[in-house]
């Protein structure tokens, strides 16, 4: 299969949002997607808060990987892979692996000492893939989220 991995452009954000919604629907959480094309354009291109890579097949975007820099008190600058999404009908074609390699290259080019991400415990295919690339699943660490209502409630405390 012939494909191209490239850095996303502002004009790609509509398709990127489609991919985000496709994944959310697959996981049964479409109603939780609040981000808009305008948010993606502003945050990624006006404010530079993330980089996005897309995978194209025959001129059509079939996958994406969105990353941003974080700072670790133990490691210094790191890269966080927020999402790596490949359309369901394109899974198993190598696109996900190609996007993953682009993220690794990006981290290496920027001299980071860690690339990190979260994977659902039920996503056994992804877990196996990541482990086969040398990534370690940190089972003793827990992802913690505070949603908007919790933020508002806690921000009011003295």
Image (cartoon, rainbow, N blue to C red):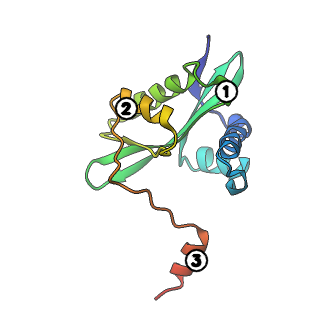
- The picture places residue 35, in percent across and down from the top left corner, at 68, 53
Q: Quadrant of residue 15?
A: top right
Q: Residue at x 67, y 27 (%)?
A: 62
| Cα distance between the residues tagged 1 and 3 | 37 Å
Expressed as whole percent of the image width and height from the top left, the position of residue 110 reads 37, 35
Determine the image quadrant of residue 4. top right
Residue at x 45% of width, y 61% of height? 144
Outermost residue toward the left? 74
Location of residue 142 in the rendering, given as x and y in whole percent from the top left corner: 40, 57
Disc 2: which residue: 131
Question: Mark 1–mark 2 contact, CB under 8 Å?
Answer: no
Alpha carbon distance from label 1 to label 2:
24 Å
Q: How many marks?
A: 3
Real-space Cα separation, disc 3 to disc 2, in angstroms: 38 Å
Which residue position is annotated with label 3?
152
Q: Residue at x 47, y 27 (%)?
A: 102
| Mark 3: few/some/many CA within 10 Å (<14, 14-19, 20+) | few
């Amino acid at each position: 299969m012939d494909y191209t991995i490239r850095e996303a452009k502002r004009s790609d954000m509509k398709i990127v949002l489609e991919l985000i919604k496709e994944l959310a629907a697959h996981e049964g959480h479409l109603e939780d997607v609040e981000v808009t094309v305008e948010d993606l354009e502003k945050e990624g291109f006006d404010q530079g808060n993330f980089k996005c890579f897309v995978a194209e097949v025959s001129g059509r975007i079939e996958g994406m990987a969105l990353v941003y820099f974080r700072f670790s008190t133990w490691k210094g600058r790191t890269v966080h892979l927020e999402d790596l999404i490949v359309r369901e009908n394109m899974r198993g074609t190598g696109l996900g692996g190609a996007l993953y390699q682009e993220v690794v290259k990006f981290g290496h080019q920027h001299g980071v000492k860690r690339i990190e991400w979260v994977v659902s415990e039920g996503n056994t295919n992804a877990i196996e893939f990541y482990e086969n690339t040398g990534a370690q699943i940190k089972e003793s660490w827990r992802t913690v989220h505070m949603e908007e209502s919790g933020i508002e409630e806690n921000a009011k405390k003295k």
